[in-house]
Image: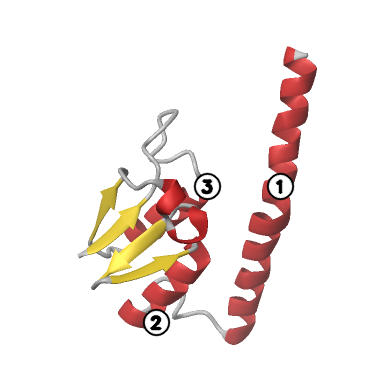
Amino acid sequence: MLTLYQFEPAWGLPNASPFCMKLETYFRMTGLEYQVDTSADVRKAPKGKLPYIEDKGQIIADSNLIIEYLKTTYGDPLDSHLSPADTAIALAMRRLIEENLYWALVLHHSDYDRVVWG
């Protein structure tokens, strides 16, 4: 069985990390059987961050690389119907959100805390 190593639930969410949340949501949407382990030490994790998975003794880190591995290994029930153009658009949107808008949100929250809390 696949094991997902991630942080413990926080703030009423399955996970406070958007990358862990993305991966757990992917598991639920695809119906892949998995178990969650929240006892992993992030300092000993591959790449020094969570999430990562273990599948048949193989460790894979980074949510995007994990999803690509899962698609290759178990099939792609979510995106297999997309045309090459739609796949490219989806990739562009994912990169925009994860690599640009995510950091704008982090910056916005830090500015909000500074203004509200001094």
Percent coordinates x, y for residue 34 in the rendering: 25, 59
Q: Are marks 3 and 1 in contact (CB under 8 Å)?
A: no
Q: Which badge, 2 or 3, comes first in the chain's sequence?
A: 3
Please say whether residue 30 is visible from this viewpoint: no
**Which of the 4 image quadrants contains residue 12?**
top left
- Residue 95 in percent (x, y) is at 66, 64
Question: Label 3 sits on what residue type?
Answer: Pro
Q: CA distance from mark 2 to mark 1?
A: 29 Å
Question: Is residue 64 positioned above or below 24 on the image?
Answer: below
Q: Which residue is mark 2?
A: 72
Q: Which image quarter is the N terminus in?
A: bottom left
57 to the left or right of 12: left
What residue sits 64% from the left and 56% below the top?
A: 98
The residues tagged by marks 2 and 3 sit, at their Cα atoms, a distance apart of 23 Å
| Earlier sequence position, callout 3 versus callout 1 | 3
Local crowd size for mark 3, using a 10 Å CA cut-off: few (<14), some (14–19), many (≥20):
few
Residue lying furthest left in this view? Answer: 1
Cα separation, mark 3 vs mark 1, equals 12 Å
Name the side, left or right, on which 88 lies relative to 43. Answer: right
Residue at image coords 40%, 68%: 60
Label 2 with label 1: CB-CB less than 8 Å: no
- Say which quarter of the image contains residue 67: bottom left
> Is label 1 in a helix, a strand or a loop?
helix
Residue lying furthest front: 44
Q: Circle 3 sits on which residue?
A: 18
Indicate the secondary structure of the residue bearing disc 2.
helix
Residue 103 is marked as 1
Q: Give amino acid for label 1.
A: Trp
Residue 77 location in percent, x, y?
37, 74
Q: Determine the residue positioned at 34% across, 47% down.
A: 40
